[in-house]
Image (cartoon, rainbow, N blue to C red):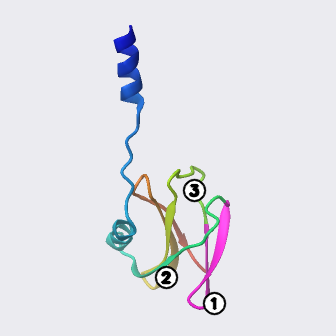
Amino acid sequence: DRRQRQMCIRDSLLIVHPITVSQARNLVEQAGYTDLYRFQSVDWDAIRFAQVINNDTEIIGCTMPEEKDPLGWYGFRAFKDGERYCVVVSVSRGQIEVQEKQGE
């Protein structure tokens, strides 16, 4: 019985290998985005945020995913097909969570 409980506990542990900024950037580029600008200092717990970037000349904003990431997010302003996007990557899941077109 004790061994069975130990196996149960061991099997339920989730091992997470967070991705780096470089890996997140590569992921976004592989999705077809160019001219990436990483933004920081965002209230990642907000439902929606706006961030001033590029020496106060540009505002980027995204609606955040409902499912929070315990390790945080990497956010990028990026372009695809001539359109400007806010792209958010999950650190723990290593995937793009938000791809929101700007200026709509």
Counting every numbered tag in the picture gives 3
Residue 102: give x, y in percent of width and height.
Answer: 58, 78
Given this view, does label 3 or label 1 mark the residue nearer the observer?
Answer: 1
**SS assignment at label 1:** loop
Q: Is residue 5 left or right of residue 71?
A: left
Q: Is residue 77 left or right of residue 27?
A: right
- Dot 3, crowdedness within 10 Å: few (<14), some or many (≥20)? some
- Dot 1, crowdedness within 10 Å: few (<14), some or many (≥20)? few
Q: Is residue 48 magenta?
A: yes
63 or 49: which is nearer to us? 49
Q: Is residue 42 magenta?
A: no
Query: Which of the two discs, 3 and 2, labels the residue nearer the N terminus?
Result: 3
**SS assignment at label 2:** strand
Task: Kindly identify the amino acid type of the residue bearing the numbered disc 1.
Answer: Asp
Q: CA distance from mark 3 to mark 2?
A: 21 Å
Given this view, does label 3 or label 2 mark the residue nearer the observer?
Answer: 3
Can you identify the residue that label 1 sits on? 56
Residue 84: give x, y in percent of width and height.
Answer: 51, 81
Given this view, does label 1 or label 2 mark the residue nearer the observer?
Answer: 1
Residue 87: give x, y in percent of width and height.
Answer: 49, 70
Q: Which label is found at residue 83?
A: 2
Task: Kindly identify the amino acid type of the residue bearing the numbered disc 2.
Answer: Glu
The rendered magenta stretch, by its main secondary structure, is classed as strand
Task: Kindly identify the amino acid type of the residue bearing the numbered disc 3.
Answer: Pro
**What span is in magenta?**
46-62
Residue 86 position (above or below residue 79) = above
Can you identify the residue that label 3 sits on? 65
Q: If the image is split into quadrants, where does the N terminus sit?
A: top left
Residue 6 position (above or below residue 20) = above
Q: CA distance from mark 1 to mark 2?
A: 20 Å
Q: If the image is split into quadrants, where does the C terminus sit?
A: bottom right
85 or 88: which is nearer to us? 88
